Amino acid sequence: MKIAPSILSADFSRLGEEIRDVEAGGADYIHVDVMDGHFVPNITIGPLIVEGIRPVTKLPLDVHLMIENPDRYIEAFAKAGADYITVHVEACPHLHRTIQLIKSLGVKAGVVLNPATPVSTIQQIIEDLDMVLLMSVNPGFGGQNFISSTLRKIREVKEMADSKGLQLEIEVDGGINAQTAKLCVEQGATVLVAGSAIFNQLDRKAAIENIRGI
Ligand code: DX5
Ligand code: ZN
């Protein structure tokens, strides 16, 4: 499994050090939670921060856009150094166009589904995706409890991908700890986002290994 620490739970006064710490601790991606105060009830990070952290790490930056009208900002996040950009199906009336826009900028593209959004919403677009991100909490805040109905959605995405012969990342975001990580991987998840379970621990290497079940 790949682990993507979410910097939402990092100490923002020392963001560079926090990122170096999780990279040294074995992280695979850095997960960046972008919130606009409209699509979700919180405001966080813009392209300026992504640009600032880009030189700090060699790890891919996995940029999760929880914003309305993401098309307006995709180019700015691509230029800032995003390696993956994921957009919410609930925020994209022209999802095919949005995905093509991300890919046209040389960035890997993914779609995110909120807990109440069915997997069938990506049936017609899955061939174009590098990643499907399943929210296992309602987006907006770190430190919430894992919603267990996500497990069968992971299985559904895996079956949809396998039936079409696709190799894509299946990422799960929210409430990930050692217990929920194991359950997600059993259903076919390949990337796990973890914020509070990593950044709330002093020893980030131990926290990452704990999620991996080492
Ligand atoms: C929630 C964010 C998550 C969040 C996860 O809106 O998308 O990435 O930071 O935090 P934890 O791991 O604490 O649930
Ligand atoms: Zn996220």
Image (cartoon, rainbow, N blue to C red):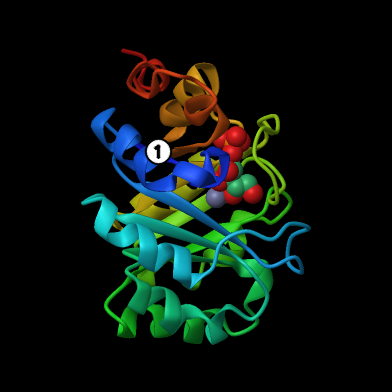
> Are there few (<14), some (14-19), or many (20+) residues within 10 Å of tag 1?
some
**In the rendered view, would you say 60 is above or below 26?**
below
Residue 191 shows up from this direction: no
Q: Where does label 1 land, which residue?
A: 18
| Residue type highlighted by circle 1 | Glu
What is the quadrant of the N terminus in the image?
Answer: top left
Left or right of residue 116, residue 131 in this image:
left
Decide if residue 17 is on the left or right side of residue 173.
left
Q: Which of the image's four quarters has the C terminus?
A: top left
Q: Is residue 19 left or right of residue 24?
A: right
Name the residue nearer the viewer: 12 or 109. 12
Number of numbered discs: 1
Q: Position of residue 152 (x, y in %)?
A: 59, 37
Find residue 83 and report its image quarter. Answer: bottom left
Coordinates of residue 149 in the picture (x, y in percent): 67, 35
State the residue at coordinates (36%, 57%): 53
Q: Where is residue 163 in the image (x, y as percent from the top left)?
A: 37, 53
Q: Can residue 39 be seen in this view?
A: yes
**Residue at left 70%, top 51%?**
140
Q: Which residue is drawn at 34% across and 79% down?
A: 79
**Is residue 206 placed above or below 154 in the rendered structure?**
above
211 or 49, nearer to the observer: 49
Q: Is residue 65 or residue 205 the one in the foreground?
A: 205
* Quadrant in which residue 167 is drawn: bottom left
Q: Is mark 1 on a helix, strand or loop?
A: helix
The outermost residue toward the left is 58
Residue 195, x across and y down, in percent: 53, 36
Tell whether 85 sits left or right of 141: left
Q: Which residue lies furthest to the top in this view?
A: 214
